Amino acid sequence: MDIFKIKGPVRIKGTVAVNGSKNSSLPIMAAAILAPGKSVLRNVPNLSDITVCARLLRKLGCKVTRVNGDSLSIDSTVIDNPVGEYEIVRQMRASICILGPLLARCRRVKVSMPGGCAIGDRPVDIHLRGLRELGAKITLKNGYIVADAPKGLRGKEIFLGGPFGSTVLGTANVMMAAVLAKGRTVIESAACEPEVADLANCLNKMGAKISGIGSPRLTIEGVKELQPVEHKIIPDRIEAGTFMVAAAITKGELKIENCRLDDMMAVVDKLRGIGVTVEADDGGCFVTRKGPIKTADITTQPYPGFPTDLQAQFMALLALGKGNSVIIEKVFPDRFMHIAELNRMGANLRKEGQAVIVAGVKKLVAAPVMASDLRASAALVLAGLAADGTTVIDRVYHIDRGYEKIETRLNPLGAKIVRESV
Protein backbone atom coordinates (compact mmCIF):
# COMPACT_ATOMS: atom_id res chain seq x y z
CA MET A 1 0.00 0.00 0.00
CA ASP A 2 1.30 3.47 -0.89
CA ILE A 3 1.49 6.59 1.24
CA PHE A 4 2.19 10.23 0.46
CA LYS A 5 4.68 12.33 2.38
CA ILE A 6 3.95 16.00 1.71
CA LYS A 7 6.28 18.73 2.93
CA GLY A 8 4.74 22.17 3.35
CA PRO A 9 4.03 24.93 3.16
CA VAL A 10 4.72 25.45 -0.55
CA ARG A 11 3.53 27.82 -3.26
CA ILE A 12 1.99 26.29 -6.38
CA LYS A 13 3.04 28.15 -9.52
CA GLY A 14 3.18 27.24 -13.22
CA THR A 15 1.00 25.53 -15.82
CA VAL A 16 -1.02 22.32 -15.62
CA ALA A 17 -3.37 20.66 -18.11
CA VAL A 18 -6.63 19.04 -17.04
CA ASN A 19 -7.19 15.44 -18.11
CA GLY A 20 -10.36 13.94 -19.51
CA SER A 21 -13.29 13.48 -17.17
CA LYS A 22 -13.43 10.28 -15.14
CA ASN A 23 -17.14 10.72 -14.52
CA SER A 24 -17.74 11.10 -18.24
CA SER A 25 -15.41 8.31 -19.38
CA LEU A 26 -16.97 5.53 -17.30
CA PRO A 27 -20.58 5.67 -18.60
CA ILE A 28 -19.35 6.29 -22.16
CA MET A 29 -17.19 3.17 -21.91
CA ALA A 30 -20.36 1.32 -20.90
CA ALA A 31 -22.21 2.89 -23.85
CA ALA A 32 -19.84 1.10 -26.24
CA ILE A 33 -21.76 -2.08 -25.35
CA LEU A 34 -24.71 -0.75 -27.36
CA ALA A 35 -22.90 -0.72 -30.74
CA PRO A 36 -21.29 -3.99 -31.91
CA GLY A 37 -17.88 -3.18 -33.38
CA LYS A 38 -14.89 -1.06 -32.41
CA SER A 39 -15.34 2.32 -30.76
CA VAL A 40 -12.44 4.65 -29.95
CA LEU A 41 -12.58 7.05 -27.01
CA ARG A 42 -10.00 9.81 -26.81
CA ASN A 43 -8.85 11.91 -23.83
CA VAL A 44 -9.51 9.05 -21.38
CA PRO A 45 -7.48 9.45 -18.16
CA ASN A 46 -5.27 6.59 -16.96
CA LEU A 47 -6.92 5.94 -13.60
CA SER A 48 -7.56 2.88 -11.46
CA ASP A 49 -11.32 3.33 -11.97
CA ILE A 50 -10.82 3.23 -15.74
CA THR A 51 -8.77 0.05 -15.32
CA VAL A 52 -11.56 -1.53 -13.28
CA CYS A 53 -14.15 -0.58 -15.91
CA ALA A 54 -11.96 -2.06 -18.66
CA ARG A 55 -11.71 -5.33 -16.71
CA LEU A 56 -15.48 -5.37 -16.33
CA LEU A 57 -16.02 -4.89 -20.07
CA ARG A 58 -13.51 -7.64 -20.88
CA LYS A 59 -15.44 -10.03 -18.61
CA LEU A 60 -18.54 -9.29 -20.68
CA GLY A 61 -16.67 -10.29 -23.85
CA CYS A 62 -15.34 -6.92 -25.08
CA LYS A 63 -11.77 -6.33 -26.21
CA VAL A 64 -10.37 -3.21 -24.54
CA THR A 65 -6.93 -1.79 -25.28
CA ARG A 66 -5.25 1.52 -24.55
CA VAL A 67 -3.70 3.15 -27.61
CA ASN A 68 -1.67 6.33 -28.10
CA GLY A 69 -1.56 7.12 -24.40
CA ASP A 70 -4.94 8.71 -23.80
CA SER A 71 -7.19 6.68 -26.11
CA LEU A 72 -9.17 3.50 -25.52
CA SER A 73 -10.28 1.05 -28.18
CA ILE A 74 -13.36 -0.93 -27.18
CA ASP A 75 -14.46 -3.75 -29.47
CA SER A 76 -17.91 -4.90 -28.36
CA THR A 77 -18.60 -7.20 -31.30
CA VAL A 78 -19.05 -10.10 -28.87
CA ILE A 79 -20.99 -9.87 -25.60
CA ASP A 80 -21.18 -13.49 -24.44
CA ASN A 81 -21.28 -13.09 -20.66
CA PRO A 82 -23.79 -10.36 -19.63
CA VAL A 83 -22.89 -10.61 -15.95
CA GLY A 84 -21.39 -7.88 -13.77
CA GLU A 85 -19.46 -9.97 -11.28
CA TYR A 86 -19.31 -8.98 -7.61
CA GLU A 87 -15.52 -9.07 -7.39
CA ILE A 88 -15.26 -6.28 -9.96
CA VAL A 89 -18.47 -4.31 -9.42
CA ARG A 90 -17.87 -3.97 -5.67
CA GLN A 91 -14.76 -1.89 -6.39
CA MET A 92 -16.54 0.98 -8.14
CA ARG A 93 -20.08 2.35 -8.01
CA ALA A 94 -20.03 3.47 -11.66
CA SER A 95 -20.00 -0.23 -12.60
CA ILE A 96 -23.79 -0.05 -12.35
CA CYS A 97 -23.70 1.81 -15.70
CA ILE A 98 -23.44 -1.48 -17.58
CA LEU A 99 -26.95 -2.43 -16.47
CA GLY A 100 -28.89 -0.25 -18.93
CA PRO A 101 -26.89 -0.91 -22.10
CA LEU A 102 -26.56 -4.65 -21.38
CA LEU A 103 -30.31 -4.93 -20.85
CA ALA A 104 -31.01 -3.08 -24.11
CA ARG A 105 -28.62 -5.26 -26.13
CA CYS A 106 -28.87 -8.68 -24.49
CA ARG A 107 -32.37 -8.45 -22.95
CA ARG A 108 -31.19 -10.36 -19.90
CA VAL A 109 -28.51 -9.21 -17.48
CA LYS A 110 -27.20 -9.98 -14.02
CA VAL A 111 -25.21 -7.27 -12.21
CA SER A 112 -23.96 -7.22 -8.64
CA MET A 113 -25.06 -4.39 -6.39
CA PRO A 114 -22.28 -1.77 -6.66
CA GLY A 115 -19.62 -0.68 -4.19
CA GLY A 116 -17.36 2.39 -4.23
CA CYS A 117 -16.31 5.15 -1.85
CA ALA A 118 -17.62 5.28 1.71
CA ILE A 119 -19.51 8.56 1.37
CA GLY A 120 -22.90 7.45 2.66
CA ASP A 121 -25.90 5.53 1.39
CA ARG A 122 -26.33 5.64 -2.39
CA PRO A 123 -29.18 3.29 -3.36
CA VAL A 124 -29.90 2.29 -6.95
CA ASP A 125 -33.68 2.13 -6.53
CA ILE A 126 -34.22 5.02 -8.97
CA HIS A 127 -32.18 3.19 -11.64
CA LEU A 128 -34.33 0.10 -11.20
CA ARG A 129 -37.57 2.07 -11.14
CA GLY A 130 -36.67 3.70 -14.46
CA LEU A 131 -35.78 0.40 -16.10
CA ARG A 132 -39.00 -1.18 -14.85
CA GLU A 133 -40.91 1.69 -16.47
CA LEU A 134 -39.26 0.69 -19.75
CA GLY A 135 -40.69 -2.80 -19.36
CA ALA A 136 -37.90 -4.72 -17.61
CA LYS A 137 -38.70 -7.34 -15.01
CA ILE A 138 -36.23 -6.92 -12.17
CA THR A 139 -35.53 -9.10 -9.15
CA LEU A 140 -32.84 -9.01 -6.48
CA LYS A 141 -31.17 -12.33 -5.75
CA ASN A 142 -28.09 -13.07 -3.63
CA GLY A 143 -26.76 -9.53 -3.93
CA TYR A 144 -27.35 -9.37 -7.68
CA ILE A 145 -29.77 -7.36 -9.81
CA VAL A 146 -31.38 -9.68 -12.36
CA ALA A 147 -33.14 -7.83 -15.19
CA ASP A 148 -35.18 -9.40 -17.99
CA ALA A 149 -36.80 -7.87 -21.09
CA PRO A 150 -37.35 -10.86 -23.42
CA LYS A 151 -39.54 -8.86 -25.82
CA GLY A 152 -37.34 -5.77 -25.69
CA LEU A 153 -37.88 -2.43 -23.98
CA ARG A 154 -40.60 0.08 -24.79
CA GLY A 155 -40.59 3.87 -24.49
CA LYS A 156 -42.32 5.54 -21.57
CA GLU A 157 -42.58 8.86 -19.74
CA ILE A 158 -40.40 8.46 -16.66
CA PHE A 159 -39.84 10.71 -13.64
CA LEU A 160 -36.36 10.18 -12.17
CA GLY A 161 -36.34 12.67 -9.29
CA GLY A 162 -35.23 11.40 -5.89
CA PRO A 163 -34.98 12.70 -2.32
CA PHE A 164 -31.70 14.50 -3.09
CA GLY A 165 -32.57 15.65 -6.61
CA SER A 166 -31.71 14.08 -9.92
CA THR A 167 -29.45 11.03 -10.25
CA VAL A 168 -26.50 11.19 -12.61
CA LEU A 169 -25.84 7.47 -13.01
CA GLY A 170 -29.57 6.72 -12.94
CA THR A 171 -30.13 9.14 -15.82
CA ALA A 172 -27.22 7.57 -17.70
CA ASN A 173 -28.55 4.04 -17.20
CA VAL A 174 -32.12 4.79 -18.27
CA MET A 175 -30.98 6.91 -21.21
CA MET A 176 -28.69 4.15 -22.51
CA ALA A 177 -31.47 1.59 -22.19
CA ALA A 178 -34.02 3.86 -23.86
CA VAL A 179 -32.03 4.53 -27.04
CA LEU A 180 -32.82 0.99 -28.27
CA ALA A 181 -36.36 0.87 -26.84
CA LYS A 182 -39.40 0.88 -29.11
CA GLY A 183 -41.04 4.29 -29.32
CA ARG A 184 -40.45 7.51 -27.42
CA THR A 185 -39.05 7.87 -23.92
CA VAL A 186 -39.26 11.10 -21.94
CA ILE A 187 -37.04 11.40 -18.86
CA GLU A 188 -38.28 14.11 -16.52
CA SER A 189 -36.01 15.41 -13.74
CA ALA A 190 -33.00 14.11 -15.67
CA ALA A 191 -29.55 15.03 -14.38
CA CYS A 192 -28.12 18.07 -16.21
CA GLU A 193 -24.43 17.49 -15.44
CA PRO A 194 -21.94 18.08 -18.28
CA GLU A 195 -20.96 14.41 -18.02
CA VAL A 196 -24.55 13.35 -18.79
CA ALA A 197 -24.58 15.75 -21.76
CA ASP A 198 -21.28 14.26 -22.96
CA LEU A 199 -22.80 10.78 -22.84
CA ALA A 200 -25.90 11.95 -24.72
CA ASN A 201 -23.80 13.65 -27.40
CA CYS A 202 -21.74 10.47 -27.80
CA LEU A 203 -24.90 8.36 -28.13
CA ASN A 204 -26.21 10.72 -30.81
CA LYS A 205 -22.96 10.27 -32.73
CA MET A 206 -23.68 6.53 -32.54
CA GLY A 207 -27.07 7.07 -34.17
CA ALA A 208 -29.34 7.69 -31.18
CA LYS A 209 -32.00 10.39 -31.29
CA ILE A 210 -31.80 12.35 -28.02
CA SER A 211 -33.04 15.92 -27.63
CA GLY A 212 -33.15 18.28 -24.67
CA ILE A 213 -29.50 17.57 -23.86
CA GLY A 214 -28.34 19.60 -20.85
CA SER A 215 -31.90 20.16 -19.63
CA PRO A 216 -33.96 18.29 -17.00
CA ARG A 217 -36.25 16.90 -19.72
CA LEU A 218 -34.72 14.43 -22.18
CA THR A 219 -36.66 13.06 -25.12
CA ILE A 220 -35.39 9.86 -26.72
CA GLU A 221 -36.73 8.38 -29.93
CA GLY A 222 -35.78 4.70 -29.96
CA VAL A 223 -33.75 3.33 -32.87
CA LYS A 224 -33.15 -0.24 -34.02
CA GLU A 225 -29.35 -0.16 -33.82
CA LEU A 226 -26.33 2.00 -33.07
CA GLN A 227 -22.95 2.25 -34.76
CA PRO A 228 -19.44 2.32 -33.22
CA VAL A 229 -18.09 5.80 -32.60
CA GLU A 230 -14.96 7.88 -32.16
CA HIS A 231 -15.48 10.38 -29.38
CA LYS A 232 -13.35 12.79 -27.32
CA ILE A 233 -14.13 12.94 -23.60
CA ILE A 234 -14.71 16.40 -22.06
CA PRO A 235 -12.23 17.85 -19.52
CA ASP A 236 -12.62 16.85 -15.88
CA ARG A 237 -14.21 19.81 -14.08
CA ILE A 238 -13.57 18.25 -10.65
CA GLU A 239 -9.86 17.90 -11.37
CA ALA A 240 -9.85 21.49 -12.63
CA GLY A 241 -11.55 22.65 -9.45
CA THR A 242 -9.02 20.75 -7.33
CA PHE A 243 -6.15 22.50 -9.12
CA MET A 244 -7.88 25.84 -8.59
CA VAL A 245 -8.03 25.16 -4.87
CA ALA A 246 -4.35 24.11 -4.91
CA ALA A 247 -3.45 27.57 -6.24
CA ALA A 248 -5.78 29.30 -3.78
CA ILE A 249 -4.74 27.44 -0.63
CA THR A 250 -1.02 28.01 -1.30
CA LYS A 251 -1.39 31.65 -2.40
CA GLY A 252 -0.06 30.54 -5.77
CA GLU A 253 -0.32 31.41 -9.45
CA LEU A 254 -1.55 28.67 -11.73
CA LYS A 255 -2.44 28.53 -15.39
CA ILE A 256 -4.90 25.69 -15.99
CA GLU A 257 -5.23 24.44 -19.56
CA ASN A 258 -8.07 22.37 -21.06
CA CYS A 259 -10.58 23.78 -18.56
CA ARG A 260 -14.19 24.59 -19.48
CA LEU A 261 -15.21 27.44 -17.18
CA ASP A 262 -18.76 27.31 -18.54
CA ASP A 263 -19.13 23.99 -16.72
CA MET A 264 -17.87 25.49 -13.44
CA MET A 265 -19.84 28.67 -12.86
CA ALA A 266 -20.83 27.79 -9.26
CA VAL A 267 -17.23 26.93 -8.37
CA VAL A 268 -15.75 30.03 -9.98
CA ASP A 269 -18.35 32.22 -8.25
CA LYS A 270 -17.39 30.88 -4.81
CA LEU A 271 -13.67 31.26 -5.49
CA ARG A 272 -14.07 34.86 -6.57
CA GLY A 273 -16.27 35.52 -3.56
CA ILE A 274 -13.54 34.44 -1.13
CA GLY A 275 -10.85 36.55 -2.78
CA VAL A 276 -9.40 34.27 -5.46
CA THR A 277 -8.88 35.67 -8.95
CA VAL A 278 -10.07 33.41 -11.77
CA GLU A 279 -9.55 34.75 -15.29
CA ALA A 280 -10.49 33.00 -18.53
CA ASP A 281 -7.41 32.33 -20.65
CA ASP A 282 -7.54 30.72 -24.12
CA GLY A 283 -9.42 27.49 -23.42
CA GLY A 284 -8.45 27.50 -19.77
CA CYS A 285 -7.98 29.93 -16.91
CA PHE A 286 -5.46 31.68 -14.69
CA VAL A 287 -5.93 31.39 -10.91
CA THR A 288 -4.22 33.54 -8.28
CA ARG A 289 -4.69 34.63 -4.69
CA LYS A 290 -2.93 37.55 -3.07
CA GLY A 291 -5.07 38.58 -0.10
CA PRO A 292 -6.64 36.62 2.77
CA ILE A 293 -9.22 33.87 2.27
CA LYS A 294 -12.66 35.30 2.97
CA THR A 295 -15.57 33.33 4.38
CA ALA A 296 -18.32 31.65 2.35
CA ASP A 297 -21.57 29.77 2.70
CA ILE A 298 -21.67 26.74 0.37
CA THR A 299 -24.52 24.33 -0.29
CA THR A 300 -23.83 21.36 -2.55
CA GLN A 301 -26.53 20.70 -5.14
CA PRO A 302 -27.00 18.86 -8.42
CA TYR A 303 -25.64 20.71 -11.46
CA PRO A 304 -25.58 23.64 -12.09
CA GLY A 305 -25.23 24.01 -8.32
CA PHE A 306 -22.01 23.60 -6.36
CA PRO A 307 -20.66 20.05 -6.90
CA THR A 308 -20.49 17.65 -3.98
CA ASP A 309 -17.23 16.32 -5.45
CA LEU A 310 -15.50 19.62 -4.52
CA GLN A 311 -16.99 19.96 -1.04
CA ALA A 312 -14.02 18.40 0.78
CA GLN A 313 -11.44 20.43 -1.16
CA PHE A 314 -13.23 23.70 -0.38
CA MET A 315 -13.47 22.70 3.27
CA ALA A 316 -9.68 22.46 3.39
CA LEU A 317 -9.45 25.90 1.76
CA LEU A 318 -12.02 27.59 4.03
CA ALA A 319 -10.28 26.08 7.06
CA LEU A 320 -7.71 28.86 6.49
CA GLY A 321 -10.37 31.54 6.01
CA LYS A 322 -10.62 34.71 8.04
CA GLY A 323 -13.81 34.02 9.99
CA ASN A 324 -16.60 31.43 10.03
CA SER A 325 -17.92 29.63 6.97
CA VAL A 326 -20.78 27.15 6.60
CA ILE A 327 -20.87 24.15 4.25
CA ILE A 328 -24.15 22.26 3.80
CA GLU A 329 -24.11 18.88 2.04
CA LYS A 330 -27.39 18.28 0.20
CA VAL A 331 -26.31 15.51 -2.20
CA PHE A 332 -24.61 12.98 0.10
CA PRO A 333 -25.47 14.08 3.67
CA ASP A 334 -22.96 11.69 5.26
CA ARG A 335 -20.00 12.78 3.14
CA PHE A 336 -17.97 14.20 6.01
CA MET A 337 -15.37 11.58 6.92
CA HIS A 338 -12.58 14.04 6.10
CA ILE A 339 -13.57 16.34 8.99
CA ALA A 340 -11.72 14.35 11.65
CA GLU A 341 -8.57 14.15 9.52
CA LEU A 342 -8.54 17.89 8.74
CA ASN A 343 -9.07 18.62 12.45
CA ARG A 344 -5.96 16.51 13.15
CA MET A 345 -4.11 19.05 11.00
CA GLY A 346 -5.30 21.97 13.12
CA ALA A 347 -8.54 22.85 11.34
CA ASN A 348 -11.53 23.88 13.45
CA LEU A 349 -14.51 22.05 11.93
CA ARG A 350 -17.76 21.15 13.67
CA LYS A 351 -20.50 19.01 12.11
CA GLU A 352 -24.10 19.97 12.78
CA GLY A 353 -26.39 17.55 10.94
CA GLN A 354 -25.97 18.16 7.20
CA ALA A 355 -23.88 21.27 7.88
CA VAL A 356 -20.29 21.90 8.90
CA ILE A 357 -19.24 25.07 10.71
CA VAL A 358 -15.75 26.03 9.54
CA ALA A 359 -13.98 28.36 11.96
CA GLY A 360 -10.93 29.67 10.15
CA VAL A 361 -7.48 29.16 11.68
CA LYS A 362 -4.22 30.97 10.97
CA LYS A 363 -2.36 27.87 9.85
CA LEU A 364 -2.56 24.13 9.39
CA VAL A 365 0.03 21.75 10.83
CA ALA A 366 1.32 18.46 9.50
CA ALA A 367 -0.05 15.22 10.90
CA PRO A 368 -0.46 11.55 9.95
CA VAL A 369 -3.89 11.24 8.33
CA MET A 370 -5.92 8.62 6.49
CA ALA A 371 -7.86 9.04 3.25
CA SER A 372 -11.42 7.69 3.40
CA ASP A 373 -12.56 8.32 -0.17
CA LEU A 374 -11.46 9.86 -3.46
CA ARG A 375 -12.31 13.53 -2.84
CA ALA A 376 -11.38 13.40 0.85
CA SER A 377 -7.90 12.26 -0.16
CA ALA A 378 -7.63 15.24 -2.54
CA ALA A 379 -8.59 17.55 0.34
CA LEU A 380 -5.85 16.08 2.52
CA VAL A 381 -3.26 16.57 -0.24
CA LEU A 382 -4.32 20.22 -0.56
CA ALA A 383 -4.14 20.69 3.20
CA GLY A 384 -0.69 19.09 3.20
CA LEU A 385 0.54 21.61 0.62
CA ALA A 386 -0.37 24.46 2.98
CA ALA A 387 0.50 22.86 6.32
CA ASP A 388 3.67 23.38 8.35
CA GLY A 389 5.80 20.22 8.38
CA THR A 390 5.51 16.83 6.71
CA THR A 391 2.04 15.36 6.35
CA VAL A 392 1.75 11.60 5.86
CA ILE A 393 -1.37 10.39 4.05
CA ASP A 394 -2.29 6.72 4.21
CA ARG A 395 -4.51 4.84 1.71
CA VAL A 396 -3.66 7.07 -1.27
CA TYR A 397 -5.05 4.37 -3.58
CA HIS A 398 -8.26 6.38 -3.20
CA ILE A 399 -6.74 9.37 -4.99
CA ASP A 400 -5.46 7.16 -7.82
CA ARG A 401 -9.10 6.44 -8.64
CA GLY A 402 -9.66 10.01 -9.85
CA TYR A 403 -6.34 11.83 -10.29
CA GLU A 404 -3.68 10.52 -12.65
CA LYS A 405 -0.26 10.58 -10.94
CA ILE A 406 -1.14 13.71 -9.00
CA GLU A 407 2.27 13.91 -7.35
CA THR A 408 4.14 14.00 -10.68
CA ARG A 409 1.84 16.77 -11.89
CA LEU A 410 2.01 18.94 -8.77
CA ASN A 411 5.72 18.54 -8.00
CA PRO A 412 6.90 20.51 -11.06
CA LEU A 413 4.63 23.31 -9.83
CA GLY A 414 6.38 23.58 -6.46
CA ALA A 415 4.84 20.75 -4.45
CA LYS A 416 7.01 18.39 -2.42
CA ILE A 417 5.17 15.08 -2.55
CA VAL A 418 6.89 11.71 -2.22
CA ARG A 419 5.06 8.44 -2.83
CA GLU A 420 6.33 5.50 -0.78
CA SER A 421 5.27 1.87 -0.59
CA VAL A 422 4.84 0.51 2.93
Image (cartoon, rainbow, N blue to C red):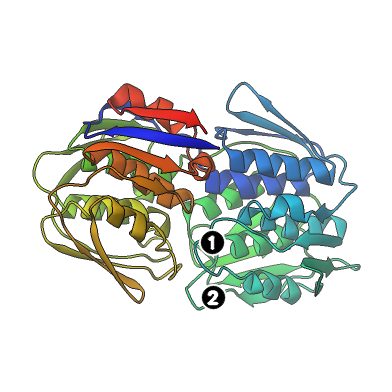
Q: Position of residue 124 (x, y in %)?
A: 64, 69
Q: Residue at x 67, y 53 (%)?
A: 95
Identified by mark 1, the residue type is Gly
Give residue 54's position: percent from left, percent from top.
71, 40
Q: Secondary structure at mark 1?
A: loop
> Residue 19 versus residue 159: which sits nearer the camera?
19
Quadrant for residue 144, please give it. bottom right
The answer to whether residue 214 shows anywhere in this view is yes
Question: How far across and how far down the image is residue 258, in percent?
Answer: 40, 33
Q: Which residue is mark 1?
A: 212
Mark 2: which secondary structure? Answer: loop
Mark nearer the N terminus (1 vs 2): 2
Q: Which residue, as the protein is rendered here, is positioned at the far left?
A: 291
Residue in view at x 11 percent, y 56 percent? 322
Residue 29: x percent and y percent? 67, 44
| Residue 179 can be seen, yes or no | no
Q: Residues within 10 Å of mark 2 (few under 14, many from 20)?
A: some
Q: Amino acid at mark 2?
A: Gly
Quadrant of the image occupied by residue 157: bottom right
Residue at (51% x, 35% y) in the render? 2
The answer to whether 127 appears left or right of 35 in the picture is left
Q: Residues within 10 Å of mark 1 (few under 14, many from 20)?
A: some
In the picture of the structure, the residue carrying the numbered disc 2 is 161
* Contact? badges 1 and 2 (CB < 8 Å): no
Horizontal side of 159 relative to 358 (left or right) equals right
Q: Nearer the viewer, residue 183 or 284?
A: 284
Q: What residue do we see at 58% from left, 73% from top?
A: 160
Whole-number angstrom distance, CA of label 1 to CA of label 2: 17 Å
Up/down of 70 relative to 267, above or below: above
